[in-house]
Amino acid sequence: MSVTDDFYAPSLKELLDAGAEKWKDSPFLKYIKNGEVVENSFIKVRNDSNAVCRWIRSTVSDKINVAIIGKTSYEYLIFFSGVLLSGNVGIPFSPDISVAEAAELFNRVDVEMLLFEDEFSDKAEELIKKCPSLKYMKNIGSENEVADIYKKYSDSSEYAELSDIEVDKDECAVIIFTSGTTGVKKGVMLSTKSLIGNIMYHDYCTDIFNENDVSLSILPMYHVYCFSGDYIKNLKDGVQVCLNGNLRDIVTNLKTFEPRVVRLVPLIAQSLLQRVKMIRFRNSELSPREAAEQVFGKNITWLISGGAYLNPELIEEYDKLGIYLRQGYGMTEAGCRISVPDDTVSRESVGRVIDLCEVRIQNGEIQLNTPTKMLGYYNMPDETAEMFTVDGWLKTGDIGYVTEDKQLFITGRVKNLIILSGGENVSPEAIEKKFGGIELVDEVLVYGENDRIVAEIYPNFDYAEVNNIQDISSVLESIVDGMNETAKASHIISKIKIRETPFEKTGAGKIKRYETVI
């Protein structure tokens, strides 16, 4: 049976209506405001989203592209939802985007409306001068203006019928810009079938998401991984979503909300583990679980990792704390996820391929067929064509393999391969993984330079201080010498570079390899 057989993708309206009908006044979106926890029910989220939909449709008559800029917040999700409900195209951006970059991208994708938070007000005024197509702006950080929209365009208003719209699920619903870790950003066009259909997979671990479970959303919503998982899928499953807002508030919000499940990236998992270890170091009478609960709260059970390589040793460390840390795998161009966490598979894998995807390996590259694949890159036909095979399979650009029981393994990136003069193809990721269990190494990037393998390292200076390591460089050189003794000739590290500052990263926590290597 093909993965496209009997495939059904609900609309966001159907999910919001179903959630309001089933869970009614149960809390769905929660956050801290002025030191107090604010709870918004499934019904309120549905009603407020419909109000925004009506406001947009009363403002514009034709389908337009709508940019939204801001940190994760209630209003951010409500207005993003309203855009999707209205049949327009939502385009999320990082709140840290510069005016120059925003203007370039706005003009490239013909943005006509901008929704922004208070902190972006000054930049918004500059943008309207630089973007000829930008006609409408709304500060969604203004409480009074937002409250007026919710009231004026409510279910009982004269505008009520404006939300009675059926969205074409095959048309573009969102444009998500790739992180740009290796070059020019591309606008990935996803339909409703792609974005929302991708959550309709079968969970292999049935105990991860349960009705009324509490999750903490800590990653930025302008990435499809977070928007799809922490918002859309939790809406479908009836899971409470606690909004973190800023990364610096993670520890405070973990203690306040005491979530059962959190989606994160490996760097955050590593950072939180170090915090647990420091608590145990200072309080030796605590058990591993007791120390973990001082960071995560007493209910934590699952951490779901994505976006980058997850070291199996980190998984083992969390197992000792009574926490399942497992990883999945996906890409924006596939709608989001390709494989999902499974506690029965090898810890070297990235989970098990979802039942919406067929995976094959061609010349080492992972390729997939799924009804949720992208429509293409916005106004980039040549780049779009390069992403697909002649028979329509999506190229992931990742090197790896899949087992008969659908376990997926990633071994590197096609575009990151180091080609040595002797013809050897070296995967830098394969070498980087060797540093995973070394506590003195906080971050590492491996690349080729003058036909040699270089490892650039940002040390864990806190670990060095606690363990009285004075000459970090010498210790790291000794560690690398030990690695080289058992390495293939093509994988020998000829040089190490020590960094004083962390690598530059994307909003999702990925190291910007391209900027570092060039």
Image (cartoon, grey):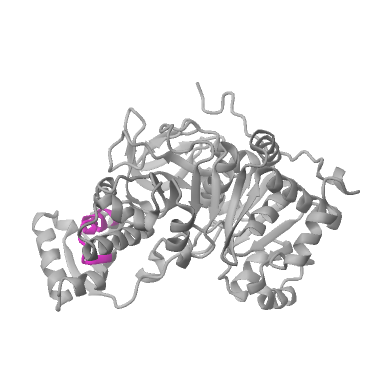
Residue 448 in view: yes
Q: Residue 502 falls in which quadrant of the image?
A: bottom left
Measured from the top left, where is residue 55 in percent x and y? 81, 55
Which of 172 and 53 lies nearest the eye of the viewer? 53
Q: Is residue 187 left or right of residue 409?
A: right
Residue stretch in magenta: 429-442
Residue 181 in view: no
Q: Is residue 310 left or right of residue 163?
A: left
Q: Residue furthest front?
A: 285
Measured from the top left, where is residue 437 in percent x and y? 21, 56
Q: Does 122 sit above or below residue 23?
A: below
Quadrant position of the C terminus in the picture: bottom left
Measured from the top left, where is residue 229 in percent x and y? 52, 46
The structure residue drawn at horizontal position 66% and vertical position 68%, both measured from the top left corner, is 117
Measured from the top left, where is residue 93 in percent x and y? 60, 62
The structure residue drawn at horizontal position 59% and vertical position 38%, both measured from the top left corner, is 236
The structure residue drawn at horizontal position 42% and vertical position 34%, both measured from the top left corner, is 207
Q: Does 87 sit above or below residue 282?
A: above
Q: Is residue 20 left or right of residue 221?
A: right
Which of 24 and 370 lies nearest the eye of the viewer? 24
Which of 323 and 309 lies nearest the eye of the viewer? 323
**Would you say residue 481 sits in the magenta stretch?**
no
Which of 66 and 301 lies nearest the eye of the viewer? 301
Q: Does 49 sit above or below residue 363?
A: below
Q: Residue furthest right?
A: 158
Q: How many marks?
A: 0
Q: Residue furthest top?
A: 1
The structure residue drawn at horizontal position 16% and vertical position 61%, both measured from the top left corner, is 492
Q: Residue 43 falls in which quadrant of the image?
A: top right
Q: Is residue 368 left or right of residue 437?
A: right
